[in-house]
Image (tube, rainbow, N blue to C red):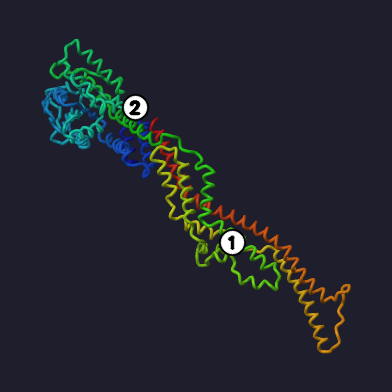
Amino acid sequence: MTNIVGRMREALRGDQRVDADALVARLDAIRRFLDAVDGEVPDTRLVGAHTLVERAGTRLSLSRDHTVVALAGATGSGKSSLFNSLAQMELSPVGVRRPTTGVAHACVWGPLDGGNRLLDWVGVLPRHRFVRESALDGDDESALHGLILLDLPDFDSVQRSHRLEVDRLLGLVDLVVWVVDPQKYADRVIHNSYLREFHRHREVTVVVLNQADRLPPAELPRVLADLRRLLDVDGLDGVPLLATTAVEPDGMTGLREALERAVSDRQAALRRLSGDADTVAAALGELVAVEAPGHVPDAGTVRALDRALAEAAGVPAVAGAVEGAYRHRAAGTTGWPLVRGWRKLRPDPLRRLHLPGPTTDPQAPEPLLAATSLPDPTAAQQSALGLAIRAVGDRSGGELPAPWPAAVTAAARSRLADLPDALDGAVAGTDLGMDRRPFWWQLVGALQWLVTLAALAGLGWLVLGYALRALGLPALDYPRVGETPLPTVLLLGGLLAGLLLAAVTRPVIRWAARRARQRAEQRLTEAVARVGAEYVLIPVRALLDRYALARCAWQDATR
């Protein structure tokens, strides 16, 4: 497209009557539109835009000195007679039976060399090209030098190939002269299928009522007025309407003057491109008919997505394991030292899930995540996640014109297959805050050891006294606390103090475990939310950005 735009800008340079930059900008906007919607809009809805973008630079780079005019009409309208009369030679076969010919004939005023490449592009065969150049004419034909006049096949031909050829050529020529006759000027085919479709090409459209000599002089104004009314209904108000006849010397004057003006202006190709741009922009407008949504999806939809992701990732299970692991580890540190050993026989809840947190391989350039043993999401969780992702698509693109809603939903689901691994990695890589032991655990553990040692000291002291008495040795004289021997106080006091300390610490551990669970749940939810943003929201927003770019380009194309 860059080359096309460059060739077009070069072709228009120096022509002060044409705003070359404005026309190039409109075509470039259509190209940007095509880039923005590539892969999202069916190609069948972009054929006209692609054709225009490719055609624009090619047409103007081939020849700015020629104006391609087509005579189009139904069987029996006399367009071939007009063609021969303008050329003053019998070049195109004349007939009233269908089909007369299925190919276009071309007559070039001036040297043929300058128009050969243009005719190659239009698709007129060399054997059907003729030159209207004769020394006998003098300067009589100089006003038409640069005119390439085409006699098209009948658009109402019974041969489908002929109709397709007419449609193809009508998309390439610079100016169209529609030829109608007094009998069929109101035919619905020409009005509904052709003239009405050219309402954005009024500046490059001429309508002639041919064979006017067949009408009584008093009837001609009435027929022309009725034809004008029909043209106004078709949206062609203001287009030139001429009466012609190929059998009278002055019957071609109006048409010839119109062709001379088109040739001298050299504006027909530019006006045709402008009309094509209007037509294409109108069709593209249906694809971007509404403003691009702003902040999408809404916060409620994102929260619902995050909850579904958290459930599918096993966040509640991990959070519960964090609470259990906190209580398990805290009890192992702050509990009575004499019974701590048996706790080691019970597995750590986090260790069972293989969730020690991030680990690092010294040989690897990036951290590696520990593998988890989280259970796969249930069918209900998978269904809830699917519904949440669909809700993101519906809320984000539901108000856009077709086919964008389906494209937004597809974007939301585009990385669905990668979500399980990404969620597992996010959970495994989240710092759950369990790799640090609180200071108060150490303090309580030290106190437990202190009272335990006191109890053991008292027990040992008492055992020593019993052993001496059993051996008949003098008994020990225990210090007393009131009436109670000190060893007994140490033993009973140590045991009671340990039990009391454990009882006081237990609710604190439960409270702290709940706090650890909440903290871990928050961190895990944030981690899976980042996964949701990367795998669901970012593709959706990227597609909506493309929609916004397409709408902006369309607005530029309509200016």
Q: Earlier in the sequence, mark 1 or mark 2?
A: 2
Q: Determine which quarter of the picture holds residue 174.
A: top left
Mark 1 residue crowding within 10 angstroms, few (<14) / some (14–19) / many (20+): many
Query: Does the CB distance between marks 1 and 2 fall below 8 Å?
Result: no
Residue sitting nearer the eye, 245 or 46: 46
Image position of 499 with respect to 298: above or below: below
Image position of 541 with respect to 330: above or below: above
Q: Amino acid at mark 1?
A: Ala
Residue drawn 23% across and 16% down? 224
Image position of 232 with respect to 53: above or below: above
Q: Residue 147, percent across and down?
A: 21, 27
Q: Determine which quarter of the picture holds residue 488.
A: bottom right
Label 1 to label 2, Cα distance in Å?
78 Å
* Image quadrant containing the N terminus: top left
Q: Tell me the residue that label 2 is attached to.
A: 16
Q: Amino acid at mark 2?
A: Gln
* Image quadrant containing the C terminus: top left
Of the numbered discs in the image, which one, if any, rests on residue 321? 1
Q: Residue 231, percent across and down?
A: 28, 21
Residue drawn 27% across and 18% down? 228
